[in-house]
Image: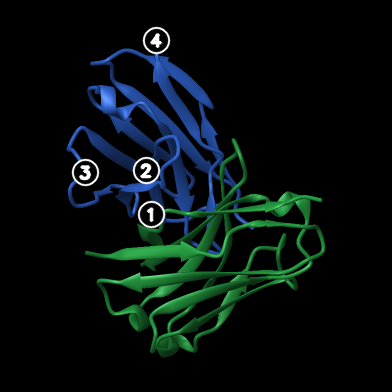
Amino acid sequence: EVQLVESGGSLVQPGRSLKLSCTASGFTFGDYVISWVRQAPGKGLEWVGFIRSKAYGGTTEYAASVRGRFTISRDDSKSIAYLQMNSLKTEDTAVYYCTRLYSGYVSAWGQGTLVTVSS
Amino acid sequence: AIQLTQSPSSLSSSVGDRVTITCRASQGISSALAWYQQKPGKAPKLLIYDASSLESGVPSRFSGSGSGTDFTLTISSLQPEDFATYYCQQFNSYPSFGPGTKVDIK
């Protein structure tokens, strides 16, 4: 069974940093693009960014709203992806989903982890 | 960046109704469009990919159509478990989601 489990969400003050983890199982992690999608309370879905597989250079892309503040990385040996979030803003408050992409579509979702940015 | 719009933003329907949701892209995206269903407190679920391909395990009452800039998700006979919010998503360029359409009970 394909599983993605996020961890690391918490309450954090504006300007601080937080790192989320996504632990995968049930598939060959290194073969897939992994992305992060967030959803602010009561709002729609927003793509945060994604990291390609090593076969495609392991490069990353980010939404304009987080570019320069957030960094996605991956450790294929552990089947874990990370989202490092720096200089957090109140508008970053959201449930963050780790997702697996296939041909550009989300073929698997984690359960989500809540990040609350507030003083 | 490619923008997606959805209409309507919400609708009220009864069990058994035929429901149609439209997604429009700001520029042509060929058939690079997916549809997701999200229920409160849950992660979204993929229903349709490549505009019209039904994801494995998804009931056949769901169907998708369209190409270029205009796309449609149709539920042929609404069931109680279909009351949810539906999102379209494109991956022709950097991915983006539509704003969502909430389907609730009339």
| Residue at disc 2, secondary structure | strand
Is mark 1 in CB contact (under 8 Å) with mark 2? yes
Comes first in the chain, label 4 or label 1: 1
| Residue at disc 1, secondary structure | loop
| Residue at disc 4, secondary structure | loop
Q: Which residue is mark 4?
A: B106
Q: Report in which chain the residue with disc 4 lies.
A: B
Q: Amino acid at mark 3?
A: Val
Q: Amino acid at mark 1?
A: Ser
Comes first in the chain, label 4 or label 3: 3
Q: Amino acid at mark 4?
A: Lys
**Position of A93 relative to A99 (above/below):** above
Mark 1 Cα-neighbour bin, 10 Å: few <14, some 14–19, many ≥20: many
Q: Are marks 2 and 3 in one subunit?
A: yes
Q: How is the image coloured?
A: by chain
Q: Amino acid at mark 2?
A: Gly
Q: CA distance from mark 4 to mark 3?
A: 24 Å
Tell me the tag on residue B66: 2
Q: Which residue is mark 1?
A: B31
Q: Report in which chain the residue with disc 3 lies.
A: B
